């Protein structure tokens, strides 16, 4: 179904609103992460490692839609902070596996609470039914577009 034409497109704020909501989410995460000395982007890497079986730079790139150069810089910073280590895979020495350190595991264990606080601040204004509708609408858009992460994580729910 086509909702937009070149005539009505300038009147739509949908793209702007989606982008602004994404930026707001990251700003709120950053505010809640100040004491942990990590960024929203670093939060995403650590929580994905904690909550999924994603453990290679290439998988994280796909998951977060980042290029390999940006991911390398991010992993360098997380390694410098002592949250992860890179290890060569035993069966394929060309492959790198990412492992949370003890400090990384401690921090990653706190991230769901921090994320929940930030998301509650962002969507706390919504009624439960509105929040469920918003999530359903976003899933529908992403699944229809064939978003690989959405399909993999929630496509069958």
Image (cartoon, grey):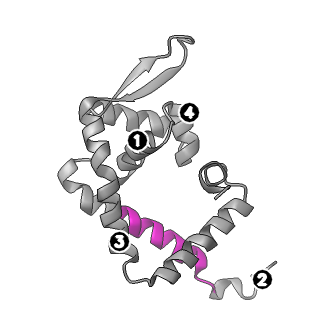
**Mark 2 vs 3, N-terminal side:** 2
**Mark 2 → mark 3, Cα distance in angstroms:** 36 Å
Disc 2 vs disc 3: which is toward the camera?
Answer: 3
Residue bearing mark 3: 120
Residue bearing mark 2: 5
Secondary structure of the residue carrying tag 2 is: loop
Residue span colored magenta: 12-28
Residue bearing mark 1: 50
**Mark 4 vs 2, N-terminal side:** 2
**Mark 3 vs 1, N-terminal side:** 1
x and y percentages locating residue 127 in the rendered image: 44, 84
Query: Do the CB atoms of the residues marked 1 and 4 lie less than 8 Å apart?
Result: no
Quadrant where the N terminus is found in the figure: bottom right
Q: Is residue 12 left or right of residue 115?
A: right
Query: Do the CB atoms of the residues marked 4 and 3 lie less than 8 Å apart?
Result: no
**Mark 3 → mark 1, Cα distance in angstroms:** 21 Å
């Amino acid at each position: 179904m086509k909702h937009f034409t070149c005539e009505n497109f300038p009147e739509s704020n949908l793209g702007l609103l989606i982008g602004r909501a994404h930026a707001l989410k990251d700003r709120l995460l950053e505010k809640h992460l100040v004491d942990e000395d990590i960024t929203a982007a670093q939060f995403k890497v650590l929580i994905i490692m904690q909550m999924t079986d994603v453990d290679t730079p290439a998988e994280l790139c796909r998951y977060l839609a980042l290029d390999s150069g940006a991911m390398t810089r991010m992993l360098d910073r997380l390694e410098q902070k002592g949250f992860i280590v890179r290890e060569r895979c035993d069966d394929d020495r060309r492959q790198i596996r990412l492992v949370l350190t003890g400090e990384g595991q401690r921090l990653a264990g706190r991230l769901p609470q921090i994320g929940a606080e930030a998301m509650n601040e962002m969507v706390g204004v919504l009624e439960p039914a509105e929040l469920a509708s918003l999530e359903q609408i976003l899933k529908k858009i992403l699944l229809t577009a064939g978003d690989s992460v959405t399909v993999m994580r929630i496509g069958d729910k």
